[in-house]
Image (spheres, helix red, strand yellow):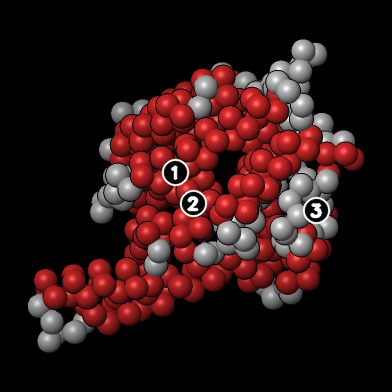
Amino acid sequence: MRNILILSVCVMLIIAWWFMPSSQVIESHRSNTLPEAMPHQVENQPTESSKSLANDKIDWQKTSLKGTDIDGMYPVDSDGNLLFSAAIKHRFEYFLSTMGEFPLDDVLQMVRGDIEANLTSPAKEQALKLFDDYIAYKYALVELEKTFEPSQHYEVSNIERFRHQLEQLRNKRREHLDSEAADAFFGFDELYDDFMLSQLEIQNNSQLTPSEKQQQIQALQQGLPEDVRQMREETERISKVFELTQEMKEEGASESQVFDYNSQQFGQEAAQRLQALDENRQAWQQKVDNYLLEKSQILKDDLLSHEEQIQEIKRLANERFTSLELKRLPAFEVMAQDSESK
């Protein structure tokens, strides 16, 4: 049962982490917080002319983009038409990552200015429409996620529920984006998510022997396209490095030693992002720990009825966490309970 819980929690973390970036762009406008941004790598970098930031309202030397190269590009075919590519989404997100630093209208205009400065007709008009569709999708996603209520019990049956939610997400993307654009923007992620859920289904199938599970998982892996296999291998490598750095910290390694190790493994820029991610993770974990401590005190208060305790805990959670954070909270509560029971 413990393994089932752990695997189910993993699914929750995968889904929560996957949904988070897209909805943060809109939510950050509402709460004035800066969304997390992890730059993507693309094979072809933009030309020098495309590195000019087209928005006179913003002092770029005072932004989080200072000292960085513009991520992504706008590929165009020989007839001047825009070629749908994930690189376009990366370019959009590069600028959208400044949400919280500037008003929403300024950031949106920044992207439109970048398009107008780097493209000519007909690609310019096509990119402008694509960006408007992309923003409309993000607004729709915020509303869709409100229907994704977290379950109070993390059982194997949740995998099917996650599958249904992912299907709803796919449909929402294609409701607002051209199917070719949706495939280019999200096709890789969707394929990888399907693989992860299928693997968890096999691992949680009590009717299979360990040998049969291994055979089915190997067959599943062999059926993956080469780029997805590479992604999976890189994810596993990052996971192993993370485990090693955690061991280093437990053995007394300093932050600079951990940073140097990550730099050797992934390069300095990636090490900086990992360091920032770890700082965010630690801050989040401290926030959760403080909440769980206060929650336990409420549950020990004999002067409160069970119904009053539930209400107090709900009030506490709403005070401590945003609506997006509340979606992540149950998974961490389960992990805390699992850790205490060991």
Q: Nearer the viewer, residue 328 or 214?
A: 328
Mark 3 lies on residue = 68
Q: Tell me which residue sits at (46%, 60%) in the image.
A: 30
Q: On the picture, is 287 further left or further right than 326?
A: right
Residue 274 x %, y %: 68, 58
For the residues labelled 1 and 2, say whether their Cβ atoms are less than 8 Å apart.
yes
**Residue 195 visible at all:** no
- Closer to the eye: label 1 or 3: 1
**Which three-letter amino acid code belongs to the residue tagged 3?**
Thr
Q: Nearer the viewer, residue 146 or 269?
A: 146
Q: On the picture, is 84 further left or further right than 117?
A: left
**Which three-letter amino acid code belongs to the residue tagged 2?**
Ile
Mark 1 lies on residue = 139
Circle 1 sits in a helix, a strand or a loop, which is it? helix
Residue 26 disc label: 2
Q: Tell me which residue sits at (50%, 27%) in the image.
A: 177
**Which three-letter amino acid code belongs to the residue tagged 1?**
Tyr
Q: CA distance from mark 1 to mark 3?
A: 28 Å
Residue 50 x %, y %: 83, 39
Circle 3 sits in a helix, a strand or a loop, which is it? loop
Q: On the picture, is 338 further left or further right than 310?
A: right
User: Is residue 178 placed above or below 25 in the rendered structure?
Assistant: above
Q: Nearer the viewer, residue 9 or 87?
A: 87
Q: CA distance from mark 1 to mark 2?
A: 7 Å
